[in-house]
Amino acid sequence: MAQTIFVLNGPNLNLLGKREPEIYGSDTLADVEAMCRKAAPNAVVDFRQSNHEGVLVDWIQEARDAASAIVINPAAYTHTSVAILDALSAFDGPVVEVHISDVHKREAFRHHSYVSLRADHVIVGHGVAGYVEGLEWALGQI
């Protein structure tokens, strides 16, 4: 039976390829989804994006019964959301935190991540390839 991995994306990631390409590149979120599906042909990749914190929390809670691992780019919620941290803490499988840019080389407020307190693996600054790296790492853990 194929493993299911949730790949969750936070606010403004729907604008990939259009928003600040000098930071985030020219690939769209659809391109990232295609890369993830290609990288994990024997897994079910459940790829989602929301601009709403509560929706992300709901999906993380859903993953408790539906997924073996979570790859998450919480975007701006990385630095603000205890709710997402709490939801991830209630998930028993591997959690990979992914950031396209190197958040440690950006504004000081981006240096702190609530999600990192729960993440089993963190990937920053590898561009959209970080998603594939995170997905492959998660698959290796389950």
Image (spheres, rainbow, N blue to C red):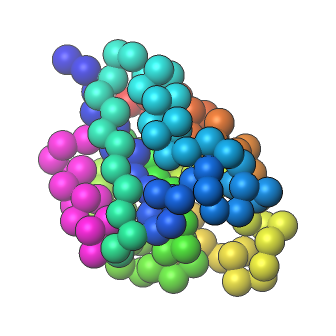
In the depicted view, which residue is nearer to us: 67 or 118?
A: 67
- Residue 136: give x, y in percent of width and height: 52, 28
Question: Does 5 sit left or right of 71 as displayed?
Answer: left
**Numbered disc total:** 0
Residue most toward the left? Answer: 65
Residue 117, visible in the rendered structure: no
The image quarter containing residue 37 is: top left
Question: Does 4 sit left or right of 40 as displayed?
Answer: left
Residue name at image x 39 percent, y 16 percent: 41
The quarter in which the N terminus is drawn is top left
Q: Is residue 129 above or below residue 11?
A: above
- Residue 16: give x, y in percent of width and height: 57, 54
- Residue 5: give x, y in percent of width and height: 34, 37
Q: Main secondary structure of the magenta part?
A: helix
Residue most toward the front? Answer: 18
In the depicted view, which residue is nearer to us: 122 or 124?
A: 124
The image quarter containing residue 132 is: top right
Residue name at image x 60 percent, y 34 percent: 133
Residue name at image x 52 percent, y 38 percent: 32
Question: Does 82 sit left or right of 133 as displayed?
Answer: left
Magenta-drawn stretch contains 24: no
Magenta-drawn stretch contains 64: yes
Q: Is residue 69 above or below residue 82?
A: above
Q: Magenta region: which residues?
A: 54-68
- Residue 12: give x, y in percent of width and height: 50, 66
Q: Is residue 26 above or below residue 61?
A: above
The quarter in which the C terminus is drawn is top left
The image quarter containing residue 94 is: top left
